[in-house]
Amino acid sequence: MKLALLKLRDCERGASLIEMALVSPFLAALVLGAVDLSRAYSDRLQLEQAAQRTIEKVEQQRTVATDYSSLADEAATAAGITKTSSNPSVGQWLECSSDGGTTWTSQGANSISSQCPNGTDLPARYVTIQIQKNFTPLVRTRYLGSNADGTYTLTAQAGIRVQ
């Protein structure tokens, strides 16, 4: 009996199976992490493309509109999200320069339809679109900057100067 135990102690058969059993959870976590990162990157890229497509519609108009409220609906459709009161958000503002474009003064948000205070100032009007979407990873966690429910908020933004 003692001889059989000594032979069993010196036997190395099955050692690689035990090593693989010890390492496989780490390998599985590494693969799941890589898959989650690639899915999150793909979703963020789709959001950025939706924001860019929406801004391209403003560029195609070639005129300075006073109402860009329909952009939020178009951005939500392009991103495949449900439109809420704050997502997607459309920003617009006016900047004025009295010295030919060296120094710019912002006239505040949602002032795109107004005019510069001094009639000789150089105007610059801007429109931006910001879209947010929650990303749910395969394995939710409350760590690594996630929301309370284990999801991550992806944000994309695009803008253009319309005048």
Image (tube, rainbow, N blue to C red):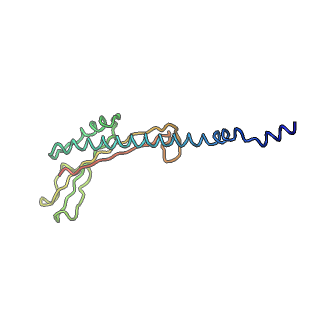
x, y (%) of residue 65?
A: 17, 44
Q: Quadrant of the N terminus?
A: top right
Residue sitting at x 39%, y 41%: 42
From this view, report whether residue 98 is shown above or below residue 111.
Answer: below
Question: Is 141 left, or right, of 71 in this rendering?
Answer: right
Which quadrant of the figure has residue 75? Answer: top left
The quarter of the picture where residue 44 lies is: top left
Query: Along the horizontal axis of the image, is 54 left or right of 147?
Result: left
Q: Quadrant of residue 7?
A: top right
Tell how many labels.
Answer: 0
Instruction: Residue at 30%, 36% (x, y): give it.
Output: 78
Residue 108: x %, y % from top left: 26, 54
* Residue 139 x/y as whole percent: 52, 38
Residue positioned most to the left: 120
Is 5 situated left or right of 66 in this image? right
Depth check, front residue: 39 or 86: 39
Q: x%, y% of residue 109?
A: 26, 51
Residue shown at the point (71%, 39%) measured from the top left: 13
Q: Which of 72 and 158 lies nearest the eye of the viewer? A: 158
Q: Is residue 78 above or below residue 97?
A: above
In the displayed structure image, the side of residue 88 where residue 124 appears, left or right: left
Residue 109 drawn above or below residue 122: above
Q: Residue at x 24, y 38 (%)?
A: 70
